[in-house]
């Protein structure tokens, strides 16, 4: 019965959220029908009916019959989304993990509330507001440590070498959620910036990063894994590299007016640019990559992007929840549609095809392969570019799985990396900090020994990952580089993670550095610039 109710109630969404759109006779008739049904169900059904979960499931059910990106967000999901895109939340400012049933402080936010009162990495939080924190699940921690700005939380901390529990009164404050993961000079001429999403603070962070790097001739803009975010930030970022007034993106939809978004200032940087993308680059990141590619302003390197080019309008539903309804499609400056093909009501197949792409099966989805991608020409050089399926890079980098073994994948899947790094840093942080006071010394001198790697494989064995000597030997150099980069991140900042891993394992980065650093005209040749 509940299944029938969920299916039938799907259209209640119309009555709750879109009354104003019922303009045709048929729409008005259906709206009245649904309103009657809702009243009868609530009023005469044999048992008490909890309407909220039925309505929420009905909304989700209805949206599942449409495009793959129209979604419902309940109140809790809305709060999480707001924090992510607004760029901050109120808390104590720590990065933590759960180790042996206790909350381990991995790092503290610089000048944040926790660091200010003296909390240190490797401290274990054992009490929160007088109650034991031992045995808490990871998901239980944020509700206890976060709270309104200016409110206080009392925590008890166990610290290595200190016999008694240390007590701290911490006043919560706004904690930034950075959208720029890394920003540094690769060499005297080249900068690198990694952007993980487009939030409210992205362009402020980006401009600060550019200013901090100083004079550079080339920039590697890493948008790989960037799932998108706020349109205005994407438009501003693309505009940073384009002349004032240059079109960045346009939108068209059935019931909304066409919109055109152009560079409002332009000219922030006129050097060489390489943009890195992959299958997880979507929406706003595709807008940036597509605009710079269409204007022949950057060499795009990596793999085909996700292909998320539908515009959602967020409609609040009065109880903290909201629905995001697709109202239009994005078009790049040359008119390309970013959205890859889909069939309404086949969301599972849409995302399954994406998973198949990650596995390297480019022909797995019949919907995508059945459609011939339209050809366009770039603005300045009249190079061929393709629409209807994400952004296709100028230089494609195929996935290299040579060093990736089944054994390594099982180790990663079982969370052994995280457990190993937490334990390793817990035992060695003070020694490492003294031995490697800066990244230069770390990069030149740090290495894992056989004993360290034996500890890793023992931890994997304890989690049911059977040791495979041949596969471990094949993957060991890659595993050591990944783990060393994680140590660099824990010792310094997330920038040092990328400073360590990129020149060793990131093929996109290595190729980009080769292209933008070439004085023989490779960059100009790719873009067909005279």
Image (cartoon, rainbow, N blue to C red):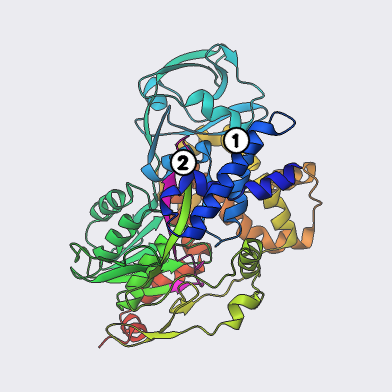
Question: Which x, y percent locates residue 413?
Answer: 69, 51
Image position of 111 (left or right of 264): right
Residue 23: % across, % down: 42, 57
Q: Indicate yes or no whether the magenta region holds residue 34.
A: no
SS at mark 1 in the image = helix
**Residue picked out by circle 1:** 52
Q: 338 above or below 105?
A: below
Q: Is residue 385 left or right of residue 9?
A: left
> Which of pointers 1 and 2 lies earlier in the amino acid sequence?
1
Q: Secondary structure at mark 2?
A: loop
Q: Quadrant of the N terminus?
A: top right
Q: Which of the two residues, 449 or 67, is positioned nearer the viewer here?
A: 67
Residue 112: give its label: none
- x, y percentage for residue 141? 56, 28
Cα–Cα span, label 1 and label 2: 12 Å
The residue positioned 35% from the left and 75% from the top of the image is: 293
The residue where tag 2 is placed is 317
Tell me whether the residue at label 1 lies in contact with that at label 2, contact meaning CB atoms closer than 8 angstroms.
Answer: no
Query: Which one is nearer the viewer's eye here, 506 or 343?
Result: 343
Q: Residue at x 61, y 82 (%)?
A: 370
Front residue of 328 and 433: 328
Q: Residue at x 78, y 49 (%)?
A: 465
In-image side of 174 versus 473 (left or right): left
- The residue depicted at 37 percent of the width and 63 percent of the height is 221
Q: Which residues lie in the magenta part?
A: 301-320
> Is-magenta flag for residue 313?
yes
Looking at the image, residue 114 sits to the left or right of residue 209; the answer is: right
């Amino acid at each position: 019965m509940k299944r029938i109710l969920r299916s039938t109630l799907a259209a209640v969404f119309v009555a709750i959220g879109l009354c104003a759109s019922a303009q045709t006779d048929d729409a008005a008739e259906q709206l009245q029908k649904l309103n009657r049904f809702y009243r009868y169900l609530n009023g005469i059904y044999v048992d008490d009916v909890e309407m909220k979960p039925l309505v929420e499931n009905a909304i989700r059910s209805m949206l599942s019959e449409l495009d793959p990106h129209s979604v419902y967000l309940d109140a809790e999901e809305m709060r999480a989304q707001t924090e992510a895109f607004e760029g901050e939340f109120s808390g104590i400012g720590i990065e933590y993990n759960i180790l042996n049933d206790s909350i381990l402080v991995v790092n503290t936010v610089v000048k944040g509330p926790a660091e200010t009162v003296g909390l240190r990495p490797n401290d274990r939080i054992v009490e929160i507001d007088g109650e034991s924190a031992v045995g808490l699940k990871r998901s239980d921690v944020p509700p206890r440590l976060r709270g309104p700005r200016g409110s206080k939380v009392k925590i008890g901390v166990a610290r290595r070498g200190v016999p008694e529990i240390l007590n701290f009164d911490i006043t919560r404050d706004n904690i930034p959620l950075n959208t720029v993961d890394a920003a540094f000079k690769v060499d005297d001429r080249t900068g690198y910036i990694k952007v993980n999403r487009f939030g409210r603070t992205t362009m402020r962070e980006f401009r600060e990063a550019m200013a901090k790097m100083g004079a550079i001739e080339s920039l590697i803009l890493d948008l790989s894994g960037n799932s998108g975010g706020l349109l205005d930030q994407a438009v501003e970022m693309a505009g940073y590299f384009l002349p004032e007034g240059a079109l960045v993106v346009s939108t068209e939809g059935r019931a909304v007016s066409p919109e055109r978004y152009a560079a409002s200032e332009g000219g922030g940087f006129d050097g060489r640019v390489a943009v890195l993308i992959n299958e997880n680059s979507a929406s706003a990141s595709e807008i940036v990559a597509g605009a710079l590619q269409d204007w022949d302003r950057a060499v795009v390197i990596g793999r085909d992007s996700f292909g998320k080019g539908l515009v959602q309008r967020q409609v609040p539903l009065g109880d903290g929840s909201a629905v995001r309804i697709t109202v239009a499609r994005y078009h790049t400056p040359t008119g390309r549609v970013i959205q890859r093909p889909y069939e309404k009501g086949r969301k599972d197949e849409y995302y399954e095809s994406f998973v198949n792409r990650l596995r390297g099966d480019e022909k797995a989805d019949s919907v995508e392969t059945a459609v011939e991608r339209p050809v366009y020409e770039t603005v300045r050089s009249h190079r061929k570019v393709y629409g209807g399926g994400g952004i296709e890079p100028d230089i494609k980098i195929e996935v290299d799985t040579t060093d990736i073994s089944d054994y390594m994948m099982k180790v990663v899947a079982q969370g052994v990396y995280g457990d190993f790094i937490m334990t390793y840093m817990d035992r060695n942080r003070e020694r490492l900090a003294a031995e490697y006071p800066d990244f230069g010394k770390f990069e030149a001198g740090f290495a894992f020994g056989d004993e360290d790697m034996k500890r890793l494989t023992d931890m994997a064995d304890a989690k049911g990952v059977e040791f495979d000597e041949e596969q471990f030997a094949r993957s060991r150099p890659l595993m050591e580089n990944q783990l060393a980069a994680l140590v660099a991140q824990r010792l310094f900042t997330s920038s040092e993670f990328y400073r360590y891993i990129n020149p060793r394992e990131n093929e996109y980065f290595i190729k980009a550095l080769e292209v933008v650093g070439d004085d023989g005209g490779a960059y100009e040749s790719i873009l067909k610039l005279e």
